[in-house]
Amino acid sequence: MRQATVERKTRETQITATVNLDGTGVSRIATGIGFLDHMLEQLARHSLIDITLEAKGDLHIDYHHTTEDTGIVIGEAVSKALGDRRGIRRYGDAVIPMDETLSRVALDASNRPYLIWKVGFSRPKLGEMDTELFKEWFQAFAQMAGLTLHVENVYGENNHHIVESCYKGLARALRQAVELDPRQVGEVPSTKGTLGKSL
């Protein structure tokens, strides 16, 4: 089974995450941030990646460190579970409608991290969570998971729908990209013979 556990302990956060890339979308998430828990549950459910995550952070200051560090830890666990990325489909994309909102996500599990984020919000907060923190989460996740990740909200009005469609789009695209391709068992999906940070 392609699974991994990662722990991160700093003066700001203590986080443990386990992922199983070949799961069924089961999640057990506890970050102390209700809306973030909801988004990570969506990520697990729609990617079919099992995710267990427990985080304790300096929420008395704000939600920044906990949000960013959960992206770091889950991303690192995904990368660790992928190993040398042999046999994966590598690319994934999704267009997600959610009521009045439409978002699209495309990614390359190339081990060359990059984020394009074309998502805007009309409100500074969703519940108690700053909307600017969602970009921080996606940036941290893409960096540590080794993804070239493009996220775009095409249109939408409801901020909840906008961010949820982005997480669901990531989930569906990730599900495609990390899936094992029976036509290239044991092969690295690159003409270079390796997936890495060099161009």
Image: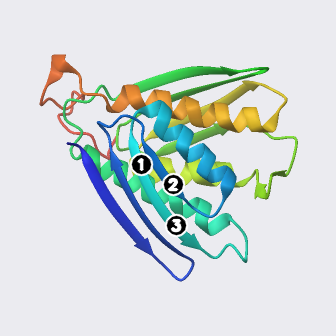
Quarter of the rendering containing residue 22:
top left
Q: Are marks 2 and 1 in contact (CB under 8 Å)?
A: yes
Query: Which quarter shows the C terminus?
Result: top left
3D distance between C-alphas at marks 3 and 1: 13 Å
Q: Position of residue 186 (x, y in %)?
A: 12, 31
**Numbered disc 1: secondary structure:** strand
Q: Vertical placement of 173 versus 49: above or below?
A: above
Residue at (32% x, 37% y) in the render: 23
Q: Position of residue 176 (x, y in %)?
A: 38, 25
Which disc number belongs to residue 29? 2
Q: Vertical placement of 166 versus 146: above or below?
A: above
Quarter of the rendering containing residue 180:
top left
3D distance between C-alphas at marks 2 and 3: 8 Å
Which disc number belongs to residue 55? 3
Q: Position of residue 172 (x, y in %)?
A: 48, 27
Q: Are marks 3 and 1 in contact (CB under 8 Å)?
A: no
Which disc number belongs to residue 33? none
